[in-house]
Image (tube, rainbow, N blue to C red):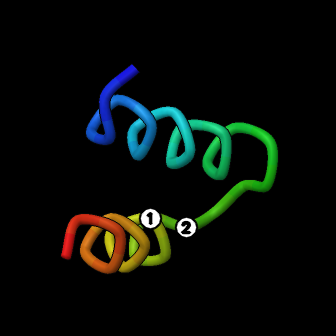
Amino acid sequence: MNSAARIEAFLEMMSAERGAAENTLSSYRRDLED
């Protein structure tokens, strides 16, 4: 699994299991991709 796939899996888990808001997910994505 490459890093982009791991980031997407993490963000999907945060959305589904923790109910993270779209702004939160965008912030996590931005931080993790840097």
Instruction: Residue 3: give x, y in percent of width and height.
Output: 32, 40
- Tell me the SS state at disc 2: loop
Res. 2 image quadrant: top left
Residue at the location (55% across, 67% down)? 21
Question: Dot 1: what SS?
Answer: helix
Give the quarter of the image for residue 33: bottom left
Q: Amino acid at mark 2?
A: Ala
| Disc 2 crowd, CA 10 A, few/some/many (<14, 14-19, 20+) | few
Q: Which of these two is toward me, 18 or 29?
A: 29
17 horizontally vs 24: left or right: right
Task: Select label 1 or label 2 by which is in front.
Answer: 1
Q: Quadrant of the N terminus?
A: top left
Please tell me which residue is depicted at 79% across the width and 54% down the height of the picture: 18
Tell me, for residue 4, which label it has, or none: none
Residue 31 in which image quadrant:
bottom left
Report crowding for label 1: few under 14, some 14 to 19, many 20 or more residues within 10 A (C-alpha).
some
Please state which amino acid type lies under the numbered disc 1: Leu
Quarter of the figure that contains the C terminus: bottom left
Compared with 23, 15 (above or below) is above
Q: State the residue position of label 2.
A: 21
Position of residue 26 in the picture relative to residue 34 (left or right): right
> Is residue 25 placed above or below 4 in the rendered structure?
below
Task: Tell me the residue at 32%/69% (across/down).
Answer: 26
Q: Which residue is mark 1?
A: 25
Are the two marked residues, 1 and 2, in contact with CB atoms closer than 8 angstroms? Answer: yes
Residue 30 or residue 6, whichever sits in front: 6
